[in-house]
Image: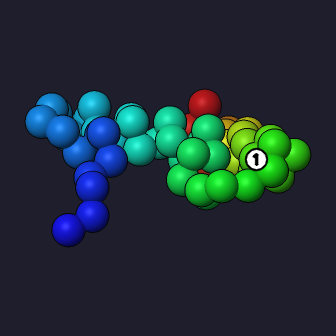
Amino acid sequence: MADKPPYHEEGTFLTSSLARAADHFGAKDKGEMDPVERWATRVGRALSVVAFVVLAWYFGHQLNWW
């Protein structure tokens, strides 16, 4: 059986979810790669979060929610 990542230890659901999200956005889930590729992955994932927030704001504005 494979070793479990550290965020699968005993704790709350929110704690493990936040740990997985931190690993994802920190590009720790990609394994071994060169530093440039790791930073490109981090930048791309951060830009996707920014795009999501901007689109959510835009659609909320169009629907007159705020």
Where the N terminus falls, by quadrant?
A: bottom left
Q: Is residue 12 left or right of residue 20?
A: left
Q: Quadrant of residue 6?
A: top left
Secondary structure category for the residue under label 1: helix
Residue 29: horizontal and vertical position, in percent? Answer: 54, 53
Colour scheme = rainbow
Q: Is residue 25 left or right of residue 61?
A: left
The residue that disc 1 covers is: 38
Tell me the residue at 50%/36% (across/down): 22
Residue 46: horizontal and vertical position, in percent? Answer: 72, 40
Residue 27: horizontal and vertical position, in percent? Answer: 63, 46
Q: Nearer the viewer, residue 54 or 41?
A: 41
Q: Is residue 66 above or below residue 61?
A: above
Number of numbered discs visible in the structure rendering = 1
Residue 57: horizontal and vertical position, in percent? Answer: 68, 39
Q: Nearer the viewer, residue 53 or 9?
A: 9
Q: Residue furthest left?
A: 10
Residue type, mark 1 in image: Arg
